[in-house]
Amino acid sequence: MKKKIQKWQAMEKSDHEAIEEIRSMLVSSSSLVAAFAKPNLSPSTTGELIADVEAAAQTFDQLLKIPWIKERIHFTVIVDHLLNARTVLKSPDALLVLLTCPHLQEDHSMMDEVIPLAFIITELNGKTSGLLRGCWSSLPPAILTNHIEVFKRALSFLLMNGLLESHDNQIKILLETLKML
């Protein structure tokens, strides 16, 4: 991944190959997790994160500094997929990776990405919800703070835009998610 990022940083404009490489990383939750999979992880490992969340955070920070990449990073497809699978998700990896991306703290992401992520989190089955809480408790403080900030920004966005009454349910979901954190 480091070599790809260096190559992309050297480019002034995107090319077809680079766009396809980025798109393939963001096409599904499994491809997103695979892009940040920990090296030498045994397939028999259970209950352990597959994704390297710290590497994901660093990578997203680097990618979002490249203007032509920043305009192409959207998680709506992945979020929609996770939304449809929320009650049967077995691993919180994709959620943890997504929440590390600073893109989710921008206003344009609140309604179509962040609020649905909060809904997914509140609807997880008991085992996956427990895994997610366990992962949150073991995250480095800076990354956990970023995860909290995503939902605080969404709550602030709704309140600042006068959406308290019309989006009462979404506010409750965001508060419930923050309570879990």
Image (spheres, rainbow, N blue to C red):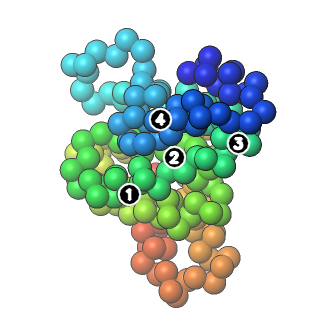
- Mark 1 or 2, which is nearer the eye? 1
Amino acid under label 4?
Met
Residue 67's place in the image compared with 161, above or below, is above
Residue drawn at x 45%, y 73% as measured from the top left: 170
Mark 3 highlights which residue?
68
Indicate which label's residue lies in the foreground, 3 or 1: 3
Which of the two marks, 2 or 4, is nearer to us in this view? 4
- Numbered disc 4: secondary structure: helix
On screen, residue 87 above or below 20: below
Q: Residue at x 54, y 51 (%)?
A: 74
Say which residue appears at 60% left-offset and 31% top-offset.
18
Q: Which mark is residue 25?
A: 4
Specify whether residue 147 is in view. no
> What kind of residue is marked 3?
Trp
Q: CA distance from mark 1 to mark 2?
A: 15 Å
**From the viewer's perspective, is 70 left or right of 134?**
right
Q: Which residue is mark 1?
A: 80
Where is residue 179? Give x, y as percent: 45, 59
| Residue 49 screen position, x and y as percent | 37, 29
What is the crowding at mark 4: few (fewer than 14 residues within 10 Å), some, or many (at least 20)? some
Considering only order in the chain, which callout, 1 or 3, is on the residue closer to the N terminus?
A: 3
Q: Quarter of the image containing the N terminus? A: top right
Foreground disc of the pair 3, 2 = 3
Farthest front residue in view: 16
Closer to the chain start, of discs 1 and 2, is 1
The residue pinned by badge 2 equals 99
- Most extreme residue toward the bottom is 165
- Determine the secondary structure under disc 3: helix
Of residues 23 and 167, the one drawn nearer to the viewer in this rendering = 23
